[in-house]
Structures are given as structure tokens and as C-alpha cells.
């Protein structure tokens, strides 16, 4: 039985839901995990959930299910080849997974540097790295890799992550360095190496801004034909950008969700989009949980503007810290006014927001999303969105041969 005791005192001031992660478990056989994408992006099944009813559709017909006059929001982040394999002089292999830039800190600047940089990384076999300089693994003696001469030095260990400095020769920007030496970091639950098919299909058609180490997978189903059909229904398509971190792969290890720590993910939202959001009259459709987290974070950024005069990052438990009396219009207006006053075209911040049962949605009405891992923060978000009805949705998907996780089938969920 699901046990959610809403609101208990946390750190003397915060009131958050008490949730046991074991209540968000289900049996997911390995054969139900889609190891590869379907031949056609829009060829997947589409679960339709509305007013408590669940039916099966095809993704290619999603446009017909959307309310006319809606705004549909996509995350246009781009996955980078963030997984690098190095070798010690002893022959030991060390895998380095780049999480987020440290020096320089901004993504655009980072990808433009031409000699050295530092990243926060997850390092495989880190105990075997004795602070010596590593060379990029090059078993085939690839000339381009040899000329690059990419090296890695361990600067600092920080618990589960490490600060790593990369240096290379030839004056190439770091974006090109990753293209030459890195691989697309497909999810670990696929239990296979990255293949050529992933270079295209683990990327949305509309990906623009480099920075993610995981794809916003709800968007993988969209084709040009589907996007055109959506626009023909008088539905406006807009974008936000949240760079997806490796935290999306991390399970909730603590029995209580309140003890789980969310990683910061940077996002960018333009003034033009905020003004459209402020004036919208139809439904707001979010493509993917990353879009949801970005959009819902905007409300709390706006509140910070109202109360302190300055926008700031959204902390994990901000939505549960107290009652909020401000309307969405008041919050967005404060944010728009701040940007105009300071001649800014966009807002660039970070969010650690966690959306769990008991969360009060401020922005999103409809969600397009894939099927998520058991006992994950993404499943908690789904449960919050459908007011605890996730069992019905997932039982239907399992009983009707839906494919699960990143390369799996899709769903469209309407919030009551």
C-alpha cells in the first residue's frame, strides 16, 4: 500500500512529503527494456491517459490528441560525447564521464577552449588512478587521436565525483576534442556499448545547444511530419534548454525520498518565451520531464524576484518549504520585468527541484513522456502529475507490450 504522510518538519523549517521509495516499485523484466530504437522515430506506441482512462494509440497520431491552441514546449539541449576512455602506463583502463564544466564554468565558453579545461566527472576504477597522467585510449592507433594527445589529470576527489583536468594539443576547441575522443553516453541499463545508431537516434531532431550527458528521451519520437501536423492544429511550439545531468541515471538509494539529493541542472529560458507563457490562453504541453522541471522551476524563480528583487537557483525543497500565495501571472510578470529592466534576453540559472506526490503544479497541464525506471525520481514525478494513478498506467503498459525506458514507447498524460 502506498504510504505518503504529507508534511513533516525537515531541518527545522521545511515541510516536505514523507515518501518511501519502495512504494514506487514495479517489476520490469529486462526483455521489456528497449535496447535499440525502432526503425521509425514516430513508429512507437503511445499510451493516452485522460480523465482516469487509459487507451493505446500510435505516436504518429499525437497531434490529433492535443488541445487546439496549446503551447507545446520542447527541451532543445544536445547530448555531448561525454564518455572518455583512458589508459594508465600500467595498462589499467579508466573511464571518465564528464558531468558538468568547472573551469571555465559556462558551457559555451567551455566548448570553445583550445588547450585545457576542468570538469566534474564520474571516474570508473578511480581507486586504481594513482594521480598519474592518463593518455586517451587508442587501441587502433587512430592518427587523429594520436595527434590530439589528450591527457587527463586527477585534481580532486569529491565523494562520488572527481575534478579532472584535460589537456590536448593542436588548438582544437573542446567540442571537437569530445567528437574525436568521446562517445555518446547511452544509459547504463541498456547493457551495451555505444553503436553507430546511437549517434543519430540518441539525439532529438531539434537538439541545438550542447551540454547534456543524457537525452531528453521524450523528444526522440518526434519527426518533421509529426511536428508539422502539430503546427497545423494551431499549436505553438516553443523551446527551453535544460542540460540533463547524470543524476537522471542515479537511483534513489535511501528508503525515504527526503534523504535523496538532487543534482543541479542548468537551464536557459528566453524573455520571448516568458512573455508568450504569460499571455497564453490554452493548455501548456511539456515534452519530457526535463521540460516539466524547467517550466515548474520558473514559478519559484519568479517568487524570488518578487521577494528579493533578484532571480536565483531553485533548491530541491523550495516548493514544499511553505505556502505560496502568488499567482503564476504575478511570478512570471516579476521575472519578465526583471529581464526587461536589466536589458536581458534570457534567464540562465540552475534547478534542483524534485517533484513528488503532493506537489502542486503551477504551469504544466499535459505531459508527453516515456516509461521510467522503478524507484526513480522520474516515476515520483509521474505519480505527482496523475495524482497517484501511475499504477494503472504502468500496469496497462506492461500488459499491452509497451517498450520501456529511453528507447521505449511514449505516453501522453493529461492532468486533472
Image (cartoon, rainbow, N blue to C red):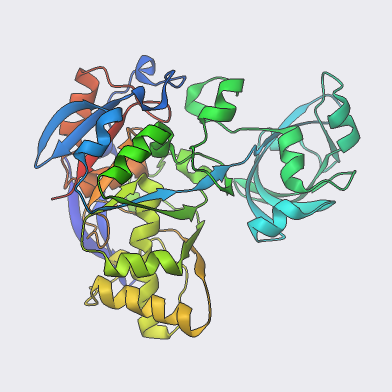
Q: Quadrant of residue 96?
A: top right
Residue 89 visible = no
Front residue of 133/217: it is: 217
Residue 168 vs 299, above or below: the answer is above
**Looking at the picture, how far across and down is residue 5, in whole percent?**
18, 54
Front residue of 238/29: it is: 238
Q: Is residue 257 left or right of residue 351?
A: left
Q: In which quarter of the image is the N terminus?
A: top left
- In the displayed image of the protein, which residue is found farthest to the top? 31
Residue 330 vs 192, above or below: the answer is below
**Looking at the picture, how far across and down is residue 258, in whole percent?**
34, 54
Q: Which residue is drawn at 15% across and 32% down?
A: 392
Front residue of 380/306: it is: 306
Q: Is residue 346 left or right of residue 408?
A: right
Q: Residue at x 51, y 28 (%)?
A: 201
Q: Is residue 255 left or right of residue 104?
A: left
**Looking at the picture, how far across and down is residue 22, in whole percent?**
28, 37
Q: Which residue is drawn at 19% across and 58% down?
A: 6
Residue 170 vs 400, above or below: the answer is below
**Looking at the picture, how far across and down is residue 360, in whole percent?**
22, 60
Q: Residue at x 24, y 77 (%)?
A: 326
Q: In which quarter of the image is residue 402?
A: top left
Q: In this view, does 263 lie to the left or right of 238?
A: right
Q: Quadrant of residue 149?
A: top right
Amino acid at each position: 500500500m502506498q504510504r505518503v504522510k504529507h508534511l513533516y518538519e525537515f531541518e527545522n523549517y521545511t515541510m516536505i512529503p514523507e515518501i518511501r521509495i519502495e512504494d514506487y516499485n514495479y517489476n520490469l523484466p529486462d526483455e521489456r527494456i528497449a535496447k535499440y530504437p525502432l526503425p521509425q522515430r514516430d513508429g512507437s506506441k503511445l499510451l493516452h491517459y485522460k480523465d482516469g482512462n487509459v487507451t493505446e494509440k500510435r505516436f504518429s497520431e499525437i497531434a490529433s490528441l492535443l488541445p487546439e491552441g496549446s503551447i507545446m514546449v520542447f527541451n532543445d539541449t544536445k547530448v555531448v560525447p561525454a564518455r572518455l576512455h583512458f589508459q594508465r602506463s600500467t595498462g589499467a583502463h579508466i573511464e571518465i564521464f564528464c558531468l558538468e564544466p568547472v573551469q571555465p564554468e559556462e558551457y559555451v565558453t567551455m566548448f570553445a577552449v583550445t588547450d585545457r579545461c576542468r570538469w566534474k566527472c564520474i571516474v570508473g576504477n578511480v581507486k586504481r588512478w594513482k594521480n598519474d597522467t592518463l593518455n586517451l585510449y587508442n587501441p587502433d592507433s587512430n592518427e587523429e587521436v594520436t595527434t590530439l594527445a589528450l591527457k587527463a589529470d586527477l585534481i580532486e576527489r569529491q565523494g562520488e565525483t572527481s575534478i579532472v583536468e584535460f589537456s590536448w594539443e593542436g588548438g582544437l576547441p573542446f567540442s571537437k576534442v569530445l567528437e574525436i575522443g568521446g562517445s555518446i553516453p547511452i544509459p547504463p541499463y541498456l547493457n551495451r556499448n555505444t553503436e553507430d545508431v546511437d549517434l543519430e537516434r540518441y539525439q532529438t531532431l531539434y537538439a541545438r545547444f550542447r551540454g547534456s550527458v543524457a537525452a531528453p528521451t521524450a523528444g526522440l519520437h518526434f519527426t518533421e511530419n509529426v511536428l508539422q501536423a502539430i503546427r497545423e492544429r494551431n499549436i505553438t511550439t516553443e523551446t527551453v534548454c535544460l542540460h540533463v545531468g547524470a543524476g537522471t541515471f542515479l537511483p534513489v538509494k535511501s528508503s525515504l525520498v527526503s534523504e535523496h539529493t538532487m543534482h543541479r541542472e542548468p537551464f536557459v529560458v528566453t524573455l520571448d518565451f516568458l512573455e508568450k507563457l504569460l499571455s497564453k490562453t490554452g493548455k501548456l504541453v511539456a515534452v519530457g520531464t526535463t521540460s516539466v522541471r524547467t517550466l515548474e522551476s520558473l514559478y519559484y524563480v519568479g517568487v524570488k524576484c518578487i521577494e528579493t528583487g533578484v532571480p536565483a537557483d531553485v533548491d530541491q525543497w523550495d516548493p514544499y518549504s511553505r505556502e505560496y500565495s502568488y499567482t503564476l501571472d504575478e511570478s512570471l510578470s516579476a521575472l519578465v520585468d526583471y529581464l526587461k529592466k536589466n536589458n536581458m534576453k534570457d534567464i540562465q540559472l540552475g534547478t534542483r527541484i524534485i517533484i513528488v506526490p503532493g506537489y502542486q503544479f503551477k504551469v504544466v497541464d499535459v505531459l508527453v513522456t516515456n516509461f521510467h525506471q522503478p524507484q526513480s525520481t522520474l516515476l515520483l514525478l509521474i505519480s505527482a502529475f496523475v495524482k497517484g494513478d501511475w499504477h494503472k498506467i504502468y500496469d496497462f503498459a506492461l500488459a499491452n507490450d509497451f517498450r520501456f525506458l529511453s528507447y521505449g514507447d511514449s505516453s501522453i498524460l493529461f492532468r486533472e
